[in-house]
Image: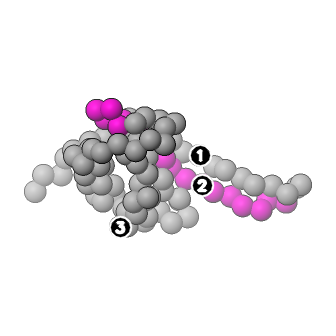
Amino acid sequence: MDNSDPIAPTQIEHSIDEAWDGERLEQRYNFLDYHFDEQGCYLRARVYLDDSQTATLFGPFEGRGSIAKVVSPSTEQAVLTYLRRRYAKVWQR
């Protein structure tokens, strides 16, 4: 069995978003974003670290910052393969 990945993220970004009401913390999101740029399309996967077994995949889009969808079955499948090797659940949006 080949354990190599068919694609690698171009960037992995760790972020924390917090929503405050005055001095009271209302919500806190600790997450990783995986960015994939390949052959004119872009996909992003997000993993919330409080549920580190689930990844949500967005795209493919024309590029970062774009909401214009593109069709790229081979790139999408490569990204899904990458994510499924790491996470028990992968949702597509």
Place of residue 68 in the rendered image (x, y in percent of width and height, measured from the top left): 44, 41
Name, please, the residue furthest toward the right.
22
How many numbered marks does the figure carry?
Answer: 3
Does 38 lie within the magenta span?
yes
Residue 6 located left or right of residue 26:
left
- The magenta span reads 24-41
Label 3–label 2 contact, CB within 8 A: no
Front-lying residue, 41 or 14: 41
Residue 30's mark? 2
Label 3–label 1 contact, CB within 8 A: no
* SS class, disc 3: loop
Instruction: Name the residue that disc number 3 marks.
Output: 88
Place of residue 24 in the rendered image (x, y in percent of width and height, measured from the top left): 85, 60
Residue 15's mark? 1
Query: In percent of the image, x 43 and y 46: which residue is there?
Result: 44
- Which of marks 1 and 3 precedes in the sequence? 1
Please name the amino acid that badge 1 sits on. Answer: Ser
Residue 5 located left or right of residue 44:
left
Label 1–label 2 contact, CB within 8 A: yes
Is residue 86 shown to the viewer in this render?
yes
- Which of marks 2 and 3 precedes in the sequence? 2
Q: Distance between the residues labelled 3 and 2?
A: 19 Å
